């Protein structure tokens, strides 16, 4: 199990594209044995030709038994005509091995198990065009797992997974027969499954394999950086001593021929030392946040009273849901995928309308919303146009964007060409420029590396306004100082969610997910 590590922009995703043959190499080759590749991209885009295919049909197509059997039959027909053909015999062996790998006898049971553990059991007959973006991501992941490929390439696979689903995926991958390469910023997930880390160095553009999980890699890498700093410091000191001697020799009188001669020798030594000077690792570029609201909200910025909601032709999702928030509170919404967490946030911001009940805001409450699918961004517009606000001049906006690592002409890039990590930075920048006193965050740590996650968490901890957050990262929610949590327990499809509000504790959160995991 190999993790591809490195900061945002180091080239991890590009490496995957190169392995897949989608990225032209300047030099070198990939020696990949004859095996099937399974790939889960960071951004899921399912072709419209699958719109009317059911979830079951879409995932099952990852093992095309009928097509492979037909190819095998055709190969046997060719063999009858050319019985001495080693090429045909080899092809038959490959096809037979492929059919054997499908495990046809147990295929349906395995597919059903994967769909159930991915929280998709109620969607098996749904058309792909009926699914939300998050649901499509999970279906695509289920298909990759079911494909049973010899090499899996997973790019940020946990972005849309709750903790219990993440646990299933971790268990599944630990027992996977093939090789798995993962790009992920989910440290807790990586630590449970990886035994090697391939680090892509953004400074030197070189790659190195470290044995052990992600935490072990970080320990080894920190030791290497300390040792590198010692070496470079010593090199710099020696270079400085030689430079000072050369300068004295150059300033010496012509009569001091010995010093001048030694100076010329030292100049050659200096040139060699400068050429050998090790490149010090670049300082990690950190985003900078300023999230102070313009003015405080009322004492109760939000109150939800008897909220009832359902989607058309779907069972009631919420029935008489009630809670209120106090100013400055950090409020966590937790529950399994598909339980209605994002729906609740969309009801609060007014994107959806409740069937009954009220959502009441205090005077002066201003809202900023971070959507996990980046719905708040217009991909046709530039970064600058997406972030513009009447409260800031263009100079001020460009300064804010620079804090988010968008410099100079970067701000004129269309959002549609950005990587998911870059889109996440734009989305975060957009909500912070609103200077809101009620911030609503839907999976804000997706696409961010651990260092940036830490920075975001530290800044939100000091935020004086109110926060509602949906997150499956216990470390992040603890960083921002969650005070209470709204638990949406698993319920029968025909029953609405019965919300539970509790004071936050890590133990309670983990116990809740334990009750909804494979462990029970």
Image (cartoon, rainbow, N blue to C red):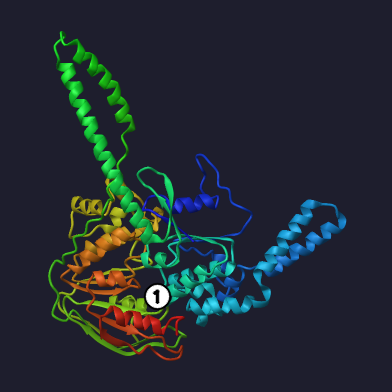
* Residue 78 position in % (x across, y down): 82, 57
For the residue pair 177 and 299, the one nearer the viewer reads as 177
How many numbered badges does the structure rendering display? 1
For the residue pair 496 and 179, the one nearer the viewer reads as 179
Q: Is residue 233 above or below residue 420?
A: above
Q: Is residue 242 above or below residue 368?
A: above
Visible in this render: residue 411? Answer: yes
Visible in this render: residue 374? Answer: no
| Residue at screen point 30% across, 48% down | 225
* Residue 156 position in % (x across, y down): 43, 62
Q: Quadrant of residue 151?
A: bottom right
* Residue 311 position in % (x across, y down): 42, 83
Q: Mark 1 points at which residue?
A: 163
| Residue at screen point 64% across, 77% down | 106
Q: In which quarter of the image is residue 295?
A: bottom left
SS for dot 1: helix
Q: In which quarter of the image is residue 354?
A: bottom left
Residue 102 is left or right of residue 186, and the answer is: right
* Residue 110 position in % (x across, y down): 59, 76
| Residue at screen point 30% across, 21% down | 268
Q: Is residue 169 above or below residue 499?
A: above
| Residue at screen point 27% across, 58% down | 387
- Residue that lies at the very extreme toward the front in this rendered image: 258
Q: Dot 1 surroundings within 10 Å: few (below 14), some, or many (20 or more)?
A: many
Quadrant for the C terminus in the image: bottom left
Residue 114 is left or right of residue 372, and the answer is: right
- Residue that lies at the very extreme toward the top in this rendered image: 255
């Amino acid at each position: 199990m190999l993790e591809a590590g490195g900061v945002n922009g180091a080239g991890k995703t590009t490496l995957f594209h190169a392995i897949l043959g989608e990225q032209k190499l300047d030099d070198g080759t990939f020696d990949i044995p004859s095996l099937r590749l399974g790939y889960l991209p960071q951004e899921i885009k399912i072709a419209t030709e699958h719109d009317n295919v059911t979830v079951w049909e879409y995932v099952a197509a990852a093992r095309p038994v009928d097509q492979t059997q037909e190819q095998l039959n055709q190969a046997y027909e060719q063999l009858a005509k050319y019985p001495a053909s080693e090429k045909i015999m080899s092809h038959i062996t490959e096809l037979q091995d492929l059919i054997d790998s499908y495990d046809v006898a147990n295929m349906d049971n395995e597919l059903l198990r994967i769909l159930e553990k991915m929280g998709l059991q109620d969607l098996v007959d749904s058309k792909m065009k009926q699914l939300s973006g998050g649901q499509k991501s999970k279906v695509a992941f289920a298909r990759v797992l079911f494909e049973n490929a010899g090499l899996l390439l997973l790019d940020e696979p946990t972005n849309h997974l709750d903790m219990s689903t993440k646990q299933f995926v971790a268990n599944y991958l630990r027992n996977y027969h093939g090789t798995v390469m993962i790009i992920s910023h989910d440290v807790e997930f990586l630590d449970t499954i990886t035994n090697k880390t391939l680090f892509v160095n953004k400074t030197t553009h070189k790659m190195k394999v470290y044995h052990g999980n992600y935490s072990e890699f970080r320990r080894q890498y920190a030791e290497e950086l300390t040792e590198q700093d010692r070496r470079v410091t010593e090199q710099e000191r020696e270079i400085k001593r030689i430079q000072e001697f050369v300068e004295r020799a150059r300033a010496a009188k012509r009569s001091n021929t010995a010093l001048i001669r030694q100076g010329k020798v030292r100049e050659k030594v200096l040139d060699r030392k400068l050429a050998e000077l090790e490149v010090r690792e670049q300082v990690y570029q950190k985003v900078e946040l300023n999230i102070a609201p313009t003015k405080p909200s009322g004492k109760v910025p939000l109150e939800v009273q008897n909220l009832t909601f359902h989607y058309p032709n779907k069972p009631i999702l919420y029935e008489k849901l009630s809670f209120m928030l106090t100013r400055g509170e950090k409020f966590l919404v937790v529950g399994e995928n598909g339980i209605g967490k994002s729906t609740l946030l969309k009801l609060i911001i007014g994107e959806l309308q409740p069937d009954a009940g009220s959502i009441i805001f205090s005077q002066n409450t201003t809202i900023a919303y971070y959507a996990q699918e980046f719905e708040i961004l217009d991909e046709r517009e530039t970064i600058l146009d997406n972030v513009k606000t009447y409260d800031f001049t263009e100079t001020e906006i460009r300064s804010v964007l620079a804090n988010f690592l968008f410099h100079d002409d970067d701000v004129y890039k269309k959002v549609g060409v950005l990587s998911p990590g870059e889109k996440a930075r734009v989305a975060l920048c957009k909500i912070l420029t609103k200077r809101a006193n009620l911030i609503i965050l839907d999976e804000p740590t997706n696409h961010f590396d651990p260092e940036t996650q830490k920075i975001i968490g530290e800044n939100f901890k000091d935020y004086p306004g109110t926060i509602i957050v949906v997150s499956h990262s216990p470390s992040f929610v603890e960083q921002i100082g969650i005070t209470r949590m709204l638990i949406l327990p698993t319920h029968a499809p025909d029953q609405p969610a019965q919300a539970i509000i509790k004071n936050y504790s890590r133990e309670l959160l983990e116990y809740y997910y334990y009750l909804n995991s494979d462990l029970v």
